[in-house]
Image (spheres, rainbow, N blue to C red):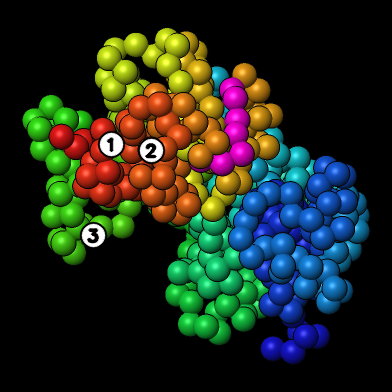
Amino acid sequence: MSQAELPRLTVIGTGYLGATHAICMASLGYDVVGLDVDDRKIQKLQSGEVPFFEPGLPELLAKTLESGRLRFTTSYAEAAEHGDVHFICVGTPQKPGLDACDLSYVEAAVRGLAPHLTRRCLVAGKSTVPVGTASHLLGLLRELAPAGEEVELAWNPEFLREGFAVDDTLRPDRLVFGVVSDWARERLTAAFRPILDLGTPTVVTDLATAELVKMAANSFLATKISYINAMAEVCEATGADVRDLAQALAYDDRIGGRFLQPGLGFGGGCLPKDIRAFAHRAEEIGVGQAVSFLREVDAINRRRRSRTIDLVRELLGGRLDGARIACLGAAFKPNSDDIRDAPALDVARTMHGLGATVRVYDPAALDNARRAYPELRYGTSAMDVSRDADVVVLLTEWAEFRQIEPTVLAQVVRRTRIVDGRHALDADVWRSAGWEYRALGRP
């Protein structure tokens, strides 16, 4: 397909998903306009600054801006005039105080774009939404767009892993096209031609199924993580070792070892809110019992945080009040600065509230952590926050924390006691260096 035949793309929303999608598609040769209502975000991107941490993305942004194939705007009229395919990539957070998904940003994006759509085009949703949302948005588009039924809607869910988003965009393990016409399928095919040419598996389906894929995938992943953490609770009660149990299960190819990793549990802006929204939506449409297990998946995950604090308390003889605690990690996962529903900061904040002197270090998420939790203390390195600590707690499994030499860390702490909240360290190595080592689900 020649450059002239490539559809022109717009990306509505330039947060984590949208900015990544816009930059990566421009790197594949598409002419892309990214839109956001946040002028500061647009100015940053247009000047070559990625407003979040994602390996490889800043270099790709500089390259695509220089090529002239990527630009950013706050004008819906400009985006509508440019695009043949408009990707909706805005956030769908959890509603405050509720399990339901907040669709106000998605609806606002459609309402902002639709009045400017005067010719045939495709609007393709990528945001994670409850099943049934696309049908509602299609009606809204047809009502508000001057082009009326010439405007079609598709759903193309994203499957990005933070820290690997560039690779997941350019070399995904699958593409899902939820469409209502052959024309919409052809438009999406053209919009992903270089990726499809790599042999990427593609599922072409209806709108509802495409919406369900992302929710179902995240729910399955969350269930697998919570399952092994439920086994950790059993191990703690029986003296068994969850690491050995997980290893034995992983050899069964029906189960597999990926994400069968015991520890502090999941967080971030996707899994927690998605399983809650899925359970909520299932109840709304009368099939709540079918996914009622997701409530327990969520509960198991939450319990890991309090149980981690219990391990710290046990090492301190039953009291956190007055103890000096070093927390290694703030982001919900390594290679990210995302602190949304981060187990690490939840644990740190709770211990602070129980009277401990808590110091936190993270290689990428400190600025976000300081803004969200100014009551905590922060440091410049693992060694810095561990100075005179009574307990060190590993809460995010960054590579640099895995590589800490226990004998070196022992020189700065007050007591050689460590809680490995992520099963990231070699227990034998740390114990042989004189450390009292504890981890969830291990004797």
Residue that label 3 marks: 256
Is residue 297 shown to the viewer in this render? no
| Residue 90 drawn at (x, y percent) | 68, 46
Q: CA distance from mark 3 to mark 1?
A: 32 Å
**Residue span colored magenta:** 376-382
| Label pair 1/2, CB-CB below 8 angstroms | yes
Q: Earlier in the sequence, mark 3 or mark 1?
A: 3
User: As displayed, is residue 319 above or below residue 240?
Assistant: above
Q: What type is the residue that disc 2 sits on?
A: Ala
In the depicted view, which residue is nearer to us: 243 or 279? 243
Q: Earlier in the sequence, mark 1 or mark 2?
A: 2
SS under mark 1: loop
Quadrant of image for the C terminus: top left
Residue in the image at 69% along x and 55% along y: 18
Residue that label 2 marks: 410
From the image, state whether disc 1 or disc 2 is nearer to you: 2
